[in-house]
Image: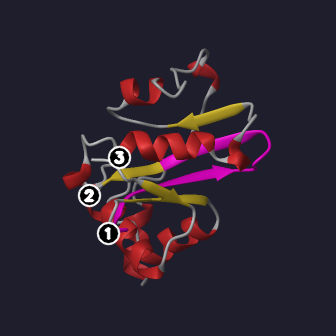
Amino acid sequence: MSGWTVSTTLSDAEIATAHRWISAESYWAKGLPLPCFQRSVANSLCFALRDAAGELRGFARVVTDRATFAYLCDVFVCASTRGKGAGKALMGAIMGHPELQDLRRWMLATRDAHGFYAEYGFSIPENPERLMQRLDPDVYARLQHRT
């Protein structure tokens, strides 16, 4: 299928769709509360992938200072669209975005798409022992109980 378009604007309905995908269908953010997702969207450079009919078929966020660093996250293509070039169209738009050029470092985390991201220059960190994280795997469950 061709006719993919990518933009950095999403309607409120598209944000709700992307939230449903990320909070219900992703392995990395199950149970993500809507207010938390909305805040993440407001503070990121977001990408909406649409088909030829203008329907949302994919989503991604880039957390960046637009000068030195970018963290690619929440990359999601709806199940009915996978295998049709949608992911490549989305990644091409992200990597070609004018505000994301000449960055020194890009990061991402993936469980199973290493080969796909390698096509865009991503690799295992040269010195993974230098990387650290602070992970709170139960935060979404606690946030759900507050709302």
Residue on which the image places disc 2? 25
Amino acid type of the residue tagged 3 in the rendering: Ala
* Quadrant of residue 70 within the rendered picture: top right
Residue displayed at 19% across by 54% down = 80
x then y, percent, for residue 139: 44, 62
Q: Which residue is mark 3?
A: 86
Q: Earlier in the sequence, mark 3 or mark 1?
A: 1
The residue positioned 34% from the left and 61% from the top of the image is 52
How far, Cα to Cα, is label 1 from label 2? 7 Å
In this rendered view, identify the residue nearer to me: 132 or 62: 62
Residue at the image position 43 percent from the left and 49 percent from the top? 75
Tag on residue 41?
none
Q: Determine whether 53 is above or below 120 in the image.
A: below
Instruction: Depth check: give the residue in front, 71 or 78.
Output: 78
Image: magenta residue range: 54-73
Give the residue number, with chain letter if any, for mark 1.
20
Mark 3 crowdedness (10 Å alpha carbons): few <14, some 14-19, many ≥20: many
Displayed quadrant of residue 102:
top right
Residue type at mark 1: give it.
Arg
User: Which quadrant of the figure contains the C terminus?
Assistant: bottom left
- Judged from the image, the secondary structure of the residue bearing numbered disc 2 is helix
Amino acid at dot 2: Glu
